Amino acid sequence: ACQQAMWAMSRLAAVVAVLSFVPVALALFEDEVGQYEWVLQQIGKPTSLAYSADAPDRIFVASASGVVASVLLKDGTMQWRRAAAEHSPLRLLRASGKGLISLSDKGFVQAWKSSSGDLTWQREYSDAVVDLLLAGSGQKQLVVVLRESEVEARTMAGKHE
């Protein structure tokens, strides 16, 4: 009986050893079929997302590694990628018909062209920036920078209003 138990234990150990080398099967749930899984390579951990009706086929992403990117909604293809703030996570991203506005943890505000990712203007603030808002439409669209000490308005081209 003791020999039989030892033989059974050694057989069980062999089966466990063999099964540990078999790859685990991954599957999708039924409601996930046809959906795309996004891998945000070269972007990093998203901290903010923005969408504009003027670019309905894409979403804009800001990341903890200081990157701003444009990604196609259809399949996750990256259209453009820009390093916005070196060694400073981005915490806000706003989109409009005229472009994008990003804010880093260190109070660095940047405006971008949503079509190409080109930098339009940038400004660093010494006091804390609480929020960014986009107001108006067309040629008169403004970026409203809400700071602890004051409120400032700039055009999307960067001119102080």
Image: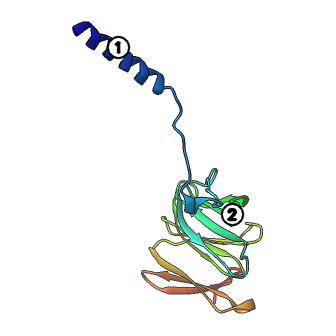
The amino acid on which the numbered mark 1 sits, given as a three-letter code, is Ser
The percent coordinates of residue 135 (x first, y second) are 61, 90
Quadrant the N terminus occupies: top left
Q: Which residue is nearer to you in this view: 47 or 148? A: 47
Residue 73 image label: none
Outermost residue on the left side: it is: 2
**In this image, 9 relative to 47: left or right?**
left
* Neighbourhood count class around disc 2 (C-alpha, 10 Å): few under 14, some 14–19, many 20 upward: many
Image quarter where the C terminus lies is bottom right
Judge by depth and name the residue closer to the eye, 58 or 151: 58
Q: Secondary structure at mark 1?
A: helix
Instruction: List the residue tagged with mark 1.
Output: 10
Against 56, is 85 above or below?
A: above
User: Residue beneath label 2, please?
Assistant: 71
The structure residue drawn at horizontal position 67% and vertical position 79%, both measured from the top left corner, is 52
Mark 1 in CB contact with mark 2 (< 8 angstroms): no
Identify the mark nearer the N-term, 1 or 2: 1
Residue type for callout 2? Val
- Helix or strand or loop: what does disc 2 sit on? strand
Farthest top residue?
A: 3
Circle 1 or circle 2, nearest the eye: 1
Question: Where does the image place residue 49, in percent across and percent down from the top left?
Answer: 57, 69
Q: Taking 99 as reference, is 29 left or right?
A: left
Residue 119 shown left or right of residue 18 in the figure = right
Across and down, in percent, residue 59 comes to 65, 69
